[in-house]
């Protein structure tokens, strides 16, 4: 199969910044697709010009109609790093596409700051909820962030300040590699930069003594969640999420998600994890949505309904948590939908649900444990241990 689609990364230096071979590809194109900025950077070639479609998902159909012609798609920097290249790779056979990477914003920003790329977190909030960067606010962490526009640094400065990281150093780098390159610096707590819309943000996180810490390992404090008292408590939640084994890009069903604590910790534990919370109560779905936004995982999807009916037509999960309402019908629907090597964890607090759990364990195997924990509380002028409700936990892997 002969390649007909070339995906070319371009920088602020335009055609002059391309290698001779890549420039020849652009100049030989019959059709060039890209944003207004990309077309401005590659003015000379006389090819037919097509702008990004709206909605952007229509791009694949437009390109399909051009198959057989010499087509170039222009992208900023490296097309396969938070850019259009990944979308095209899923839609077209490898033999149809040739990628021509350029030095991207992350590499340029790291070079300007003298930061090692191996020691930073690279994020994008371009066209995505800005709140997703909250999960990466940690002491001494360095962040490089592709922004949505001129207002994004101010939003991130507010998140940092609210969490006790107001002394964090922020650097906005705009139009890197071109004649209009600019740099803006300041602290999060006093940020008032008026910056160009096309920019990359660098953050050096500095925590105050009272900073709110948000670790990525499971077991966040209960008071970080808004809840009505019915939730998987911190000690049990840490074990639960560990048994669910969060992995990059994996999908969790949280059946009866309540305030969303397990689904949120799942999404915090590994990059690009996804979760669907099934919850029939509107007030608890509202709490789950609020918690997800506040803790940096705005992608949590919430479904109104009860299992097993609400599970129909959902995408197949890699892990399932059943926090309440375990029944044979719910288990059967979950087990059938679970992908191979998927993990299922069910917790039971009542005698009735524990009996159902034990019966299923005897039929299907797995691991059954009783989790008991106590917390120290005041007892008059002294202190004593107050037990939490014991939780029976069943976990198994689909082989």
Image: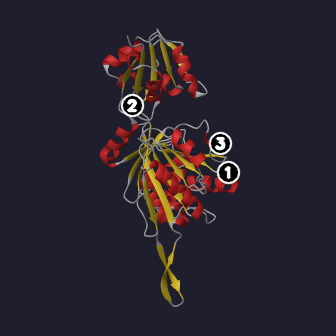
Disc 2, SS: loop
Vertical arrangement, residue 221 with respect to residue 24, above or below: below
- Asked which colour scheme the image uses, the reply is secondary structure
Q: CA distance from mark 1 to mark 3?
A: 11 Å
Disc 3, SS: helix
Residue ID at (52%, 84%): 378
> Residue 151's spot in the image, x, y percent?
56, 46
Vertical arrangement, residue 223 with respect to residue 290, above or below: below
Asked whether 131 or 263 is in front, the reply is 263
User: Label for residue 302?
Assistant: none
What residue does disc 3 label? 309
Residue ID at (42%, 43%): 248
| Image marks 1 and 2: residues in contact by CB distance under 8 Å | no
Hey, which quadrant is residue 177 in on the image?
A: top left
> Residue 224's spot in the image, x, y percent?
54, 63
User: Label for residue 78?
Assistant: 2
Asked whether 57 or 337 is in front, the reply is 337
Q: Is residue 293 visible?
A: yes
- Rate crowding at label 2 as few (under 14), some (14 to 19) or many (20 or more) other CA atoms within 10 Å: many
Q: CA distance from mark 3 to mark 2?
A: 44 Å
| Image marks 1 and 3: residues in contact by CB distance under 8 Å | no
Mark 1 vs mark 2: give the one in front: 1
User: Which mark is first along the chain, 2 or 3?
Assistant: 2
């Amino acid at each position: 199969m002969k390649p007909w689609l070339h995906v070319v990364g371009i920088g602020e230096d335009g055609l002059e910044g391309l290698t001779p071979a890549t420039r020849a590809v652009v100049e030989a194109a019959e059709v060039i697709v890209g944003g207004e900025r990309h077309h401005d950077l590659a003015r000379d070639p006389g090819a037919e010009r097509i702008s990004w479609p709206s909605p952007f998902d229509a791009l694949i159909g437009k390109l399909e109609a051009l198959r057989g012609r010499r087509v170039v798609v222009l992208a900023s920097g490296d097309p396969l790093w938070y850019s259009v290249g990944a979308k095209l790779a899923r839609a077209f056979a490898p033999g149809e596409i040739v990628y021509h990477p350029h030095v991207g914003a992350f590499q340029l920003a790291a070079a300007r700051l003298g930061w090692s790329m191996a020691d930073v977190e690279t994020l994008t909030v371009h066209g995505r909820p800005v709140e997703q960067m909250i999960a990466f606010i940690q002491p001494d962490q360095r962040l490089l962030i592709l922004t949505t526009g001129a207002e994004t640094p101010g939003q991130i400065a507010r998140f940092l300040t609210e969490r006790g990281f107001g002394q964090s150093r922020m650097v906005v780098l705009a139009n890197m590699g071109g004649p209009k390159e600019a740099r803006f610096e300041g602290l999060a707590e006093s940020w008032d930069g008026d910056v160009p819309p096309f920019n990359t943000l660098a953050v050096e996180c500095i925590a105050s003594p009272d900073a709110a810490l948000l670790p990525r390992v499971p077991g966040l404090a209960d008071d970080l969640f808004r809840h009505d008292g019915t939730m998987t408590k911190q000690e049990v939640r840490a074990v639960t999420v560990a048994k669910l084994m969060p992995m990059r890009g994996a999908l969790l069903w949280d059946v009866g998600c309540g305030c969303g604590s397990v689904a949120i910790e799942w999404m915090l534990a590994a990059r690009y994890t996804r979760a669907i919370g099934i919850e029939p109560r509107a007030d608890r779905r509202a709490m789950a949505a609020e918690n997800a936004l506040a803790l940096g995982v705005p992608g949590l999807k919430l479904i109104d309904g009860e299992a097993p009916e609400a599970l129909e037509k959902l995408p197949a999960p890699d892990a399932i948590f059943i926090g309440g309402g375990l029944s044979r019908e719910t288990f059967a629907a979950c087990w059938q939908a679970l992908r191979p090597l998927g993990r299922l964890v069910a917790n039971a607090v009542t005698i009735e649900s524990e009996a159902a759990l034990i019966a299923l364990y005897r039929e299907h195997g797995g691991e059954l444990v009783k989790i008991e924990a106590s917390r120290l509380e005041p007892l008059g002028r002294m202190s004593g241990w107050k037990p939490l409700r014991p939780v029976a936990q069943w976990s198994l892997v689909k082989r």
